[in-house]
Image (cartoon, helix red, strand yellow):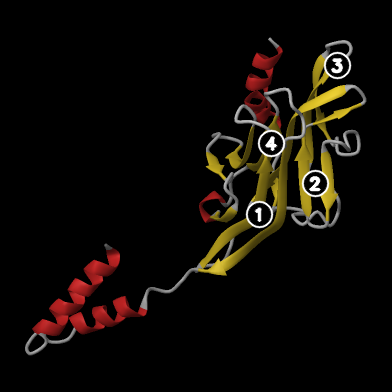
Amino acid sequence: MKKTLRQCLLPVLLGCSGMAQAGLLNPDFSQGYQHWQATVSWTDQQSGDSATDSGDLFSTYPAAFSLAGSSVTLTTALQAQRELWSLLMYQDLQLDAVGAGKALWLQFNLKALLSSSDDFYFAQLRDLDTNDVLDLSAGGRFNLTGWIGRKLTLEFGVQDNDFVLGDSLTLSQFQLESRDVPAPASLLLLCAGLLLLPRAGTGRVGTGCAATGAQHHG
């Protein structure tokens, strides 16, 4: 019964997010946990009682959340006879618009340590209105341009399902920045220019360039 509850609870908790704010705030955790929220599910070892708490819980459950420079780690843990077995950390936001010819990119590192395949973690960007999800669980770089102007929540979670605590998820090196959209490849520009030349005496060059362009796209 207890294990079935653990397997089902975390996805249900994804509906806890609220009103989105402009931009991603405190992404480097230089202000501690400010602007971030958490949800913790726990079971009391002695009484068997279980509950879920939500809000600014980082000081309440120091065994579950820890900071080290610009990184934060979520860890399923035992604290005061409570098994903290399901952890969610999130921030609601609305991405600011970028200028013409710009794209918005999110980059971060992610490391998960799980005691078995029964346990799981996730990282995702979710639309609060439509529940559309962008999977971020591999870490790395993500183009968020198509998500600008939407009410979003950035969510990270880890959950123990095998009753062996100590599963962890570490997030670090957050960067959210706009970058220039890359210009078209110079070879394609050259081919386009050559194709505009008079066909007389240039048929072979134009044909060869078109073939090169087809190979490039393929």
**Which of pointers 3 and 2 indicates the residue nearer the eye?**
3
> First in sequence: mark 3 or mark 2?
2
Image quadrant holding the N terminus, namely: top right
Secondary structure of the residue carrying tag 1 is strand
Secondary structure of the residue carrying tag 2 is loop
Residue 96 visible in image: no
Q: Distance between the residues labelled 1 and 3?
A: 34 Å
Q: How far apart are marks 3 and 2 (CA)?
A: 32 Å
Amino acid type, residue under disc 3 in the picture? Gln
Q: Which residue lies furthest to the bottom in this view?
A: 201
**How many marks overall?**
4
> First in sequence: mark 4 or mark 1?
1
Q: What crowding class fits label 2: few (fewer than 14 Cα within 10 Å), some (14-19), or many (20 or more)?
A: some
- Residue bearing the label numbered 4: 157
Amino acid type, residue under disc 2 in the picture? His
> First in sequence: mark 1 or mark 2?
2
**Which of pointers 1 and 3 indicates the residue nearer the eye?**
3
- Residue bearing the label numbered 1: 109
Amino acid type, residue under disc 1 in the picture? Asn
- Residue bearing the label numbered 2: 35
- Residue bearing the label numbered 3: 45
Image quadrant holding the C terminus, namely: bottom left
> First in sequence: mark 4 or mark 2?
2
